Image: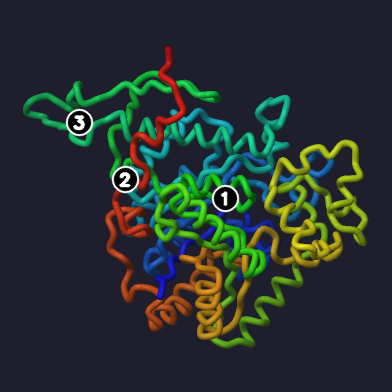
Amino acid sequence: MKTIHLGVFEVAGPQVGGTLSWPHPRSSSARFHDLEHWVHIAKVLDRGGFDFLFFADGYGYPSVNGDLPETAARGGINFPSLDPAVLIPALARETTGLGFVVTSSTGLDHPVQTARRFASLDHFTGGRVGWNIVTGASQNTIAELFGHTTMQAHDARYDQADEYLDLALRLWQDSWDDDAVRADAAAGVYAEREKLHRVEFSGEHFRSSGYFTVDPSPQRVPVLFQAGTSGRGRVYAARNAECVFVQGTTVAQTAANVADIRAQAAAQGRDPESIRIMVGLTVTVRPTHAEAEELRAEFDAMQTDETVATLYAGNTGIDLLALDPSRDLTQLLDRDDRGPVGQMGQSNIDRFLPKDGRPAPTVREILDDLKGKGTRGFQVWGDPVEVADQLEHLMDEVDLDGFLIEPIFDPADLEDVAELLVPELRRRGRMPAEPVAAATLRERLIGSEAYFRPRARAAESVQPVS
């Protein structure tokens, strides 16, 4: 029986998941500018035995016909947002075991910058940090914000991301010997020069020659997360990720994606069971089923077609409200100029295309399916026993290792999970009776201190800088 790992999916913005919830009296997420809001959440999770707090992040925003829609601004739909990475040292100071995962794209900063940032965070948290690797989001708005003339194609972004991580690994793993730091005040020696090594890297996308300035952090390599269930995304996850966040659609489709990731990892010589695979989960748990159902109904009543369309356009480049509601997404193939379609949010397009001989849903059906769901994964509600039953079913049917809780009403939903659901999961032996005493996030999640890849793996297919 697998242990259930729990993380929490957050954004430093008004609400999670691209749905509308912040105006509800149960929610205080409009206080996302307030450090105390996040300190409270972190303490709730730390006491409740959660493994980590996960921050999605990016510079983009919803765009319809090339501009910010009024719906996004009025409803706070994936807009505005702050940089969550700057929160992490403060939250680490207020907690003892909770890990922190933050998203950073491989399409903007140079790998040296990213390696330095995460090594610093690993020091400041005492080894409790993870990097959620993404190749980008809302790429059309990103291209405009950063002055790029074109938006890089979907699969090409993953090719670049492979090389990006290879260089970051060289910096983390090869620059300093384990015993290079002496910090000997009496001898006046901080580091032994002969144990520092110059990194030479020349690839198709990135070049670097020099010394990495951050000495080895507790984990050396942050725990590597990856989110994405497109075909190319699963290949990347199988090669690189220690923890994979998959999108929950149907039980059968999600199980197929999980099996594919594990099979591809095994084909590359990895232990497929060492990869922690988690799915997003919206939980409404209350002392009684009736209370949970009532609360869920209040949330559902807040959702509109406009909210759904705004979110979907920001993720995929497709304005659902501009399409024929009686037809499926293949109507986009009739267009001569499809713009960003197919180069953004590919998994959120693929899930609604025809497959296995089955008809695809119509645009009207897509709107109905996504209403109240947004980018959220599976959704469950009920009393603690009912919800625990559903979590166990998903764990076993999909071959999961845990869930990223995506709160509707923040932080009240998280308090309910910690106070009502976690004790039930502990009673069943699905979570430890006491919070895990682990030195680092990797030890807590994977059970090992060592990053899985041999050092030489990060250097293959590159040549020294001439």
Q: In the figure, 420 relative to 52: above or below? A: below
Name the residue type under label 3. Ala
The first of marks 2 and 1 along the sequence is 2
Q: Is residue 339 above or below residue 206?
A: below
Mark 2: few/some/many CA within 10 Å (<14, 14-19, 20+): many
What number is the disc on residue 180? 3
- On residue 219, the disc is 2
Q: What quarter of the picture does the N terminus occupy?
A: bottom left
**Quarter of the rendering containing residue 285:** bottom right
Give 241 or 12, whichever is nearer the viewer: 241
Direction left: furthest residue: 186
Q: Residues within 10 Å of mark 1 (few under 14, many from 20)?
A: many
- Of the two numbered discs 3 and 1 in the rendering, the one whose residue sits closer to the viewer: 1
Q: What is the distance, in whole Å, between disc 3 and disc 1 at their CAs?
A: 37 Å
Distance between the Cα atoms at labels 2 and 1?
A: 25 Å
Left or right: 148 as drawn, with respect to 64: left
Q: Badge 1 is on which residue?
A: 234
Mark 3 residue element: loop
- Horizontally, is 213 left or right of 323 in the view? left
- Which residue: 85% across, 59% down? 363
Closer to the camera, 384 or 455? 455
Q: Secondary structure at mark 1?
A: helix
Q: Position of residue 220 (x, y in %)?
A: 32, 41
On the image, the x and y values in percent for residue 338 come to 84, 39
The residue located at (84%, 41%) in the rendering is 65
Q: Amino acid at mark 2?
A: Gln
Task: Name the colour scheme.
Answer: rainbow
Quadrant into which the C terminus falls: top left
* Residue at position x 65%, y 62% in the image: 22
